[in-house]
Amino acid sequence: MADRHALLKFPSEDATRRCGVALGSLLRPGDTVLLSGDIGAGKTFLARALIQSLQHEAEDVPSPTFTLVQTYETPLGELWHSDLYRITSTDEIEELGLIDAFDTAICLVEWPDRLGDLAPAKALHIELTTDADDLQMRRATLSWTDPRWDNLVCLLTEGATP
């Protein structure tokens, strides 16, 4: 399957938050979103907005940098938010139970490069970058191979800044 790509621009934190909410409304158990980008690019911010949009009552959504995984019960089912920054081997990932969660839960994975060959082939990858000239501006490059994401990304990009 060929790689597909889309580019989104978020001129403000509010635009990034709206994207997280919109993406959250499209996800279902078994979906994995891989979030990459430098420290401070907005991975956790986007994930937090997405997670809170799926909760009955918005609760605190801490970064899983130190816990490695935070799980949440949502009306759609379980959601796993993981930050693999501190992971040094794929053995550690298997111990977390994350591989099994890819099949049954909605999974948001920060620092997905640590997954190596364990990364789900059907995942949506979002790479966030900052703009050196505008500290509020974020760019999100979405890439995927699974046709399941085609219509979902189209819905997501309809309200985005070109």
Image: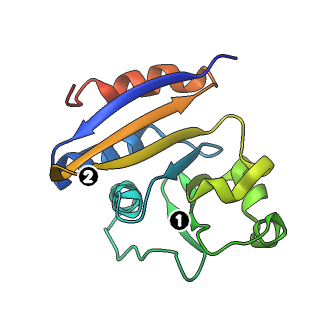
Q: x%, y% of residue 86? A: 62, 75
Q: Secondary structure at mark 1?
A: strand
Residue extending furthest front? 132
Label 2 sits on what residue type?
Arg
User: Residue placed at 64% from the left, 16% from the top?
Assistant: 2
For residue 116, above or below residue 151: below
Residue 161 seen: yes
User: Residue placed at 73% from the left, 72% from the top?
Assistant: 88
**What residue is pinned by disc 2?**
17
Label 1 sits on what residue type?
Glu
- Viewer-proximal residue, 86 or 77? 86
Q: x%, y% of residue 96? A: 74, 71
Q: Quadrant of the C terminus?
A: top left
For residue 106, above or below residue 144: below
In the picture, residue 28 is in which quadrant?
top right
**What residue is pinned by disc 1?**
73
Residue 156 seen: no
Of badges 2 and 1, nearer the viewer stands: 2
Marks 1 and 2: in contact by CB < 8 Å?
no
Q: Earlier in the sequence, mark 2 or mark 1?
A: 2
For residue 39, above or below residue 147: below
Q: x%, y% of residue 158? A: 27, 23
